[in-house]
Image (cartoon, rainbow, N blue to C red):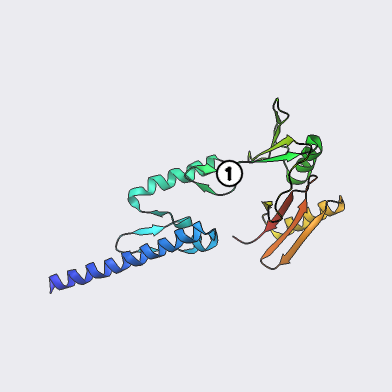
Amino acid sequence: MGEEAGQQRDAAGGDQGVQAGQQAGRSVVAALAGDWRAARDVRPESPESGVRSVALGAITSSSCSHNAERTAELGRAGGGRGVTFGGMRLNHLALAVRDIERSRRFYEKYFDFGAGPASEYPDGTVIIRDADRFDLALHPDPDPRKMPDFSHFGFACPDGATVNQRLELLTADGVPIVERYDEPRFSSFKCLDPDGYVIEVYWEPA
């Protein structure tokens, strides 16, 4: 009886391990496909092994909790904005612009890129920063290439009211608004910068 019970426990543990592995696999596939919400929501857990998933399907246990904590520390040290993975963080955007000062005024006024002194380089590039140390590099170009219609970059807001406030400010100053969504769980608009780059300002619940 003891041997039979042990075999049953092993079989159950194996089934749980397979299920956890399948769920983790779905998480990774979803992440690779760009579906971050689906990847985040898959959280396999095996009571027998104590293995639990964390965000984006990164599986951890007591043996690797130190690495998970270290990764979190690196993300916090990087400023906390955007997606972090393995200590890496997206931290700058480079735009070719016709008029450096015009673009600089636009991003400093509407998108808070006025924290700290700007950095200037011999080729004419100027880098401005926000409070989270995200760098926006502006490089002079008399004829910036047209981007594909889908191309854009975005700024996340803490709530829908902030989206509306920023929209009112841009609209009052005559900045072109090219798209607007206002739904109970999603609020966004897209506008054009002085060189025609599309910028999205949005909010959605975490």
Q: Position of residue 203 (x, y in %)?
A: 67, 58
Would you name the residue on which mark 1 appears? 90
Disc 1: CA contacts within 10 A as few (<14), some (14-19) or many (>=20): few
**In the rendered view of the protein, which quadrant contains the N terminus?**
bottom left
Q: Secondary structure at mark 1?
A: loop
Q: Nearer the viewer, residue 139 or 46?
A: 139
Relative to 87, 150 lies left or right = right
Q: Residue at x 50, y 57 (%)?
A: 31
Q: Position of residue 119 (x, y in %)?
A: 69, 29
Q: Nearer the viewer, residue 99 or 24?
A: 99
12 relative to 33, above or below: below
Q: Position of residue 123 (x, y in %)?
A: 71, 27
Residue lying furthest bottom: 1
Q: Residue at x 13, y 70 (%)?
A: 3
The quadrant where residue 51 appears: bottom left
33 relative to 118, above or below: below
Q: Residue at x 68, y 52 (%)?
A: 151
